Image: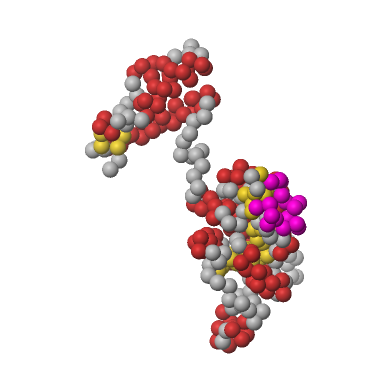
Amino acid sequence: MVKIAPPLVRTFLTGMASRALRPSLTARTCLPRLVRTMYTAPGSEMTLQSQDDWRFMQENRARFKLLYDLFSEHGSTQTRENTYQPHHAYTRAVGPSHATVSALIAAGAHLGHTRSLMNPNFLPYAFGVRAGLTVIDLDQTVPLLRRAANVARAIAQRGGTILFVGTRPDLRDIVRHAASKLGEQGYHIGERWLPGILTNRRQLFSSASQQYLITPDLVIFLNPMANVNAIRECAIQHIPTVGIVDSNVDPRIVMYPIPANDESPRTAQLVSGVLSIAGRDGILARQGEEKEKERHRDRRMILEKLSNQKHECGSVPFVSCLPKSRLFCLHIKPKL
């Protein structure tokens, strides 16, 4: 049942309406009044019983939004829109341009393994060691993540298929959700990778199912250390690979490494969301190009149709459906 809070007290409205308040006085007096009016006791709340109550609730929300905008310059104002939640990387996936260092830190992507487990080839991507743990340099992770996103966008724009691989139980729903954003061009593997699925498919599958087999154009690994055989098969078939590499992994294991914490589900959600959004942008760009080609094809058909029609005056009528830069008139000499 929806509940609404009582209206603001008159003293608070009077203090807010006064423009002579100093910033220090505003922050010291008006903000506590706002908090007291927002968080009222459950007994003083009333339920919605009519359309007027619903309208009053909407007006009350608009009034609170105005107060948030007014007092945001005096300090931090926390709302549902600007508050970080752990599930936002899953439900509100962002594109490559919004993949920032702060978002990666919030997802725990900077935490690596212990210092004794660090791979020597991972040293260029390590920021340092703190409390015995390797801290990953996210200033290098962001450009590498955007580079992988550009690869996914280019492959999807050319009609290629993208395969998401995450064989841990906590990654199965993530890869399924990421592949669903690509439609028919997205696939996922959440269970065990069947050895030989790329290099020995003729013996593994019957001849009747050969026509349904699809070779991916890009494979994204969320846990590459558990899928070394799959990465080897992709290398044999010359399939580009993208993977989240931790401090205990050799970055050369995949073609496009993304240095980050591969044991954090939130990091996997963020990375897979960025790559899936980039792939979806490529699909939309491809659809836009196809529509533009169809439009040009229709224009050419109209031109050909009009050029074949001869009029009494011996000229083809003006083509008004074309842009001004391409408008012209075809003149045909009449036969004597």
Q: Work out which residue is located at the far bottom of the displayed protein and give it.
A: 207
Q: How is the image coloured?
A: secondary structure
Q: Is residue 194 visible?
A: yes
Q: Quadrant of residue 11?
A: top left
- Compared with 269, 83 (above or below) is above
Where is residue 87 shown, x and y percent of the image? 49, 49
- Compared with 51, 230 (above or below) is below
Question: Could you tell me which residue is drawn at 74 percent across and 62 percent down?
Answer: 252
Question: Could you tell me which residue is drawn at 53 percent across and 50 percent down?
Answer: 89
Q: Is residue 145 visible?
A: no
Q: Work out which residue is located at the far top of the displayed protein and give it.
A: 20
Where is residue 246 shown, x and y percent of the image? 66, 56
User: Is 165 part of what is drawn in magenta?
Assistant: no
Magenta region: 114-129
- Compared with 50, 166 (above or below) is below
Q: Observer-nearest residue: 184 or 118? A: 118
